[in-house]
Amino acid sequence: MGLGIWSMHFIAMLASHMSMEVTYSVPVVILSTVPALVSCWIAFYLVSRPPVSVKRLLIGAVFIGTGIISMHYIGMEAMQIGAAITYNPVLFSLSAVIAFTGSLAALFLLFRLRQLTGFHWQKVGSAVLMGFAVIGMHYIGMAAATFTPLVDHGHREASSINSLSLGYTVGLGTLLLLILAHNSVRIDRRISAQTDEYELKFQSVIESAKDAIIVTDHKGLIIQWNQGAERIFGHTKETVIGESLQVIIPERIRKRHEAGMTRYFDMKQPRVIGKTLELEGVRKDGSEFPIEMSLGTWETETGVFFSGIIRDITERKQADEKISSLVYLDPLTGLPNRRLFNDRLDTLLVRAARDQQLFSLLYLDIDHFKLVNDMLGHAIGDQLLKEITERLLHQASEKDTISRLGGDEFILLLPETDYTQASNYARQILECFNKPFHFSGEELFITPSIGISLYPSDGQDAETLIKNADLALYRVKEEGKNNFQFFTNKMNEEVARRSKIAIGLRKGLERGEFTINYQPQIDINSGDIIGVEALVRWLHPHMGPISPGEFIPIAEESGTIIQLGEFVMRNACLQNKAWQDAGLPKFRVAINISARQFSQANLCGLVQSALTDSGLEPQYLELELTESSIQGAASAVKTMNELKAMGVHLTIDDFGTGYSSLSYLKLFPINTLKIDQYFTRNIHLDMKDAALVDTIIRMAHNLGLNVIAEGVETDEQLNFLKERSCNQAQGYLFNRPLPAADIARLYGNPAPAGI
């Protein structure tokens, strides 16, 4: 534009016909281009930077006007003419006003319409105004000039050029400028069109994205906001552009965000740029939700910009929580399951070892929970577990962990607790179970048993601590339930011994380590031996003699009692038959049948097989059944009737110690009631025991049943039983359990022993 103004001036000069020869100084002509170029460059630089203000237009017009005037009058100075040039001040000022006013009007129209594409008459108007500004200024400036001939005018300078040559030069230069300008405009339009195309594609991609795409400047002001951002955050583009990014950041973390921005600008060391973060965002309604954000940045001449691609991950978080609950939470109670409990225990072990802290582990089991399921149904059992969970949670603090391991077993992890605190906690749990549970308008009382282990005294790893708490729980169960017990080293020794016994039972049967002793049963009135009770004995090769009171319960738990019971039954039948074959008087041999044996479907077949193999007649075999074993079996009456039909004698052992109903005595086809030795031994120590023994004897006689008392050790006890007409007795007063050979000698007729 500057060169165009300059060209117009010198071509217009050719239209002026002077009465004298005119030449132009080349250096001054070249110098005259400088104000035109510089002024136009400054003016367009000012008005092309957004935003375009009136102040900038005014300043731009001043620069262009000044450039036009300066170029014109410097060009006039380039004239080499035999005359002095003077200027009319009024016309000189008018030329300046025209240059400034026309430039201002042209700039205003041009930059107001610069976004328009293609031909537009207002653009032509802008060009016309600028042309009139230049032309008007030129010719008024020429009109202001007065040429006064000089007498002593010298020759022109060597570096001068005449008007014709200058005209051709300027004309060719102008043509060249037009060509360059035209090509420049075409290239600019092509680049602009490509830029617009890329911008449209970019905007299309941004707007079609489901994720929020947000761009901010170095001040944190939002300059780009797509439809994804509007959908996720609720703010429209019109309301959020120019606002601070803080509008989508929760208030509680805004200071941290500002500190991060300050650190980035101060140190230029990105910590989160180029990474994907999981944060919290805030919607227009103020609700917070989880987001995933990827950050980028770039820097231009106008400053630093930041871009963020943000995704709403609410559904993913919910899915993760659901999966986590399936993996780590008990589906019934919502408590941590075994997997999550083990994770927390491992974490606590590391922290406790590092900080030298104590903690306790409580293993809790619900007493008689199986009865609740059997009597009330599993639905009530599940509801009971939920209410138990609520009571346990009410006792716990935030740092405690309560886990359900399965069934009716719970385990509690109590950080930073010692012996006293663990004791108090266990007592609180026992107390919270004192209140009844209510189901269908009825009250249900449930009690817990609790085993406790302490870190680090009872173990320094998860497996040991859990095992030892379980051992302590087992001890509570053995000692009556509804209590708590701390682990002791003695329990470990007992468990180790029990484990050895459990392992040795099966091997002992294979190696022939078991024998059978027989305790005589005496007719109280005649003093004759009327039968014997077969009692198994075990001589372990390393542990020595092991009491039946110790290994029989272990055999019950491990299931070895089935093989052990079959061993006793077959050998007792063989021994009794051997005694008979040796000439001893015929008598019954009594064999104890465990609850597990009685529940076996093949019990009758086993008895028949033992009788057949030994050749013993059924009436000389007596089976002693406990109250609990026959009550716990669904087909108890049927099994007993089958045994009775075979001719086998049936006895209820340890009568009075179970929970049977007296109506069972009518239903069960039994022959004998056996009074437990606990009552017998306390006949002269406890009047209630004496009354119970007397009642049992009377009741049995009224029902037509035989009565035998075990545990008779003194004459006083024997006399009491005689007075009450008890039929038989056995105990240390008569004989201890004896080997088979000693039984034969009691009858004075030796018999084969050790079958």
Image (cartoon, rainbow, N blue to C red):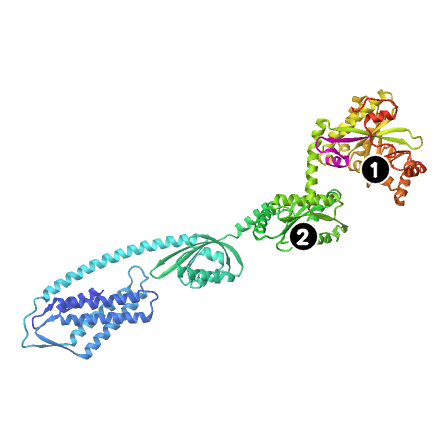
Circle 1: residue type:
Asp
Q: Residues within 10 Å of mark 1 (few under 14, many from 20)?
A: many
Between marks 2 and 1 in the image, the one whose residue lies nearer the viewer: 2
733 horizontally vs 120: left or right = right
Say which of 621 and 752 sits in front.
752
Circle 2: residue type:
Tyr
Which region shows up in magenta?
Answer: 533-554
Residue 83, placed above or below residue 246 = below
Residue 565, placed above or below residue 582 = below
Element under disc 2 = helix
Residue 566, placed above or below residue 695 = above
Residue at position x 92%, y 30% in the image: 527
**Mark sitting on residue 654:** 1
Name the image quarter holding residue 296. Answer: bottom left
Whether residue 47 can be seen here: yes
Q: x%, y% of residue 356? A: 59, 52
Say which of 262 and 520 sits in front.
520
Q: Residues within 10 Å of mark 2 (few under 14, many from 20)?
A: some
Q: x%, y% of residue 627? A: 81, 37
Name the image quarter holding residue 606. Answer: top right
Q: Identify the image quadrant of the C terminus.
A: top right
Say which of 122 and 600 sits in front.
600
Say which of 722 and 161 sits in front.
722
Residue with the mark numbered 2: 419
Q: Residues under labels 2 and 1: Cα distance?
A: 41 Å
Q: Identify the image quadrant of the N terminus.
A: bottom left
